[in-house]
Image (spheres, rainbow, N blue to C red):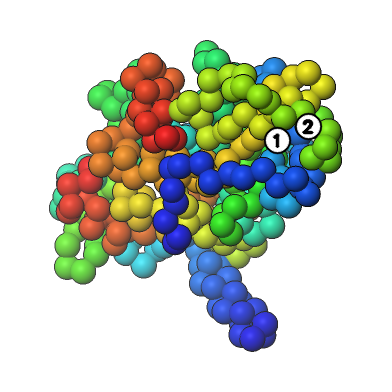
Amino acid sequence: MEFAADNEKAKQAEGEGQSQLFFGVGEYIFALNLDSLVRVVDLSSDSEKEKSGREIDLRKFFRVENEDNPISGREGFRIDLKIGNQDYGLRVDTVFGIRDFQLAIPLDFPGALRNEDNQAISGFLFDGKDMICKLDAEKLIKSSDKGLI
Amino acid sequence: MKPVSAESSLQRNSAAQWFIWEWKDHLFTIEISRVVKVIERAQVFSVPLTGARVLGLIYYQEEAVPVIHPDLLPGYKQEADKSQILPQLILLIEWDQNKIGIPVDRVIRIVEDSEIVECQEDFSDTSGFPVQALGTYQGRALYQLDGERVLASLIQTAELESKIGPLAATDKGERDEQKDIAR
């Protein structure tokens, strides 16, 4: 059974080895699988700003707005996704780029803290320096459909 | 997950050894069998949507472990600077297969049950906190941490916030709310 468990972990690690989009919202850092990624738009530049589909502001979703970081007046980035046949845009503060997390350690979300609100964070990647939240785009969309943002 | 009661389930075990630590001039204790490790200068990572009772997560042996916010314990006063509330030491305990990090200023020592003087009367108001008065150690009041109520507080606060939005970290209304949860 120990072999089976190791094998499972190895498979999981293989999955985590995929390159992911690495971005920031407030003080939090996220990684997003590239499967649904269409493009990243820098909203401070003039080109290609038009929305394509519903926009979800991750500062609101993750409740990072405060007096020091007002939502109004900022630009940041928009991450355009295609999930199913629908287009979505995620408003974020910073996009660091695409990064390979092969050496990062995948961690489960603590079971005691799990609730309907935080399903969009599927777990974490620990790279020795940061604990990066793994964003599950489909669950994020479902949460927004339920009016959780 | 096993449902968690908000009522204290603590019973004093006279055969127990107790791990005693200090936090904000208060002495706390827990049975040594619950202690996993004391971690020095652990990095506490902020994570969204985990509830106001969670200070952050630490990495420990391939696990992300929640560290409780200090205001869940008696003696905490609001700090203007968030960096001031990050503890020097974190006591890792395990309760119902959940690891939890507890802020610690100083480890005192491990003692036998016989070294703790039983209290005839309740020496302090512990209502609203997941602790109960255990006795005194070297003339100082000793609070026994109730891991089950700590867990219940973390779970219920996170669930409450998922329904009504974030609770302010230290305002009075939220403290009353916290007391209700911890009870």
Label at residue B135 = none
In the depicted structure, whether residue A124 falls above or below residue A10: above
Residue type at numbered disc 1: Thr
- Residue placed at 31% from the left, 48% from the top? A117
In the depicted structure, whether residue B47 falls above or below residue B85: below
Dots 1 and 2 on the same chain = yes
- In percent of width and height, residue B94 lies at 63, 52
What residue occupies the far front of the structure in this picture?
Answer: B120
Identify the element where label 2 is drawn: loop
Mark before the other along the chain sequence, 1 or 2: 1
> Which residue position is annotated with label 1?
B29
Q: Nearer the viewer, mark 1 or mark 2?
A: 2
Q: Chain of mark 2?
A: B
Residue closer to the observer: A18 or B79: B79
- Residue placed at 59% from the left, 74% from the top? A9
> Which residue position is annotated with label 2?
B116
- Residue placed at 21% from the left, 69% from the top? A84
Report if residue A105 is visible in the image.
Answer: yes
Quadrant in which the C terminus of chain B is drawn? top left
In the depicted structure, whether residue B159 falls above or below residue A87: above
Q: Quadrant of residue B142?
A: top right
- How crowded pointer 2 is (Cα within 10 Å; few <14, some 14-19, many 20+) is rated as some
- In percent of width and height, residue A4 lies at 61, 85
Residue closer to the observer: A59 or B65: B65
Q: Chain of mark 1?
A: B
- Residue placed at 58% from the left, 44% from the top? B10
Circle 1/circle 2 CB separation < 8 Å: yes
Residue type at numbered disc 2: Ile
- In percent of width and height, residue B163 lies at 25, 42
User: Cα distance, mark 1 to mark 2?
Assistant: 10 Å
Report if residue B36 is visible in the image.
Answer: no
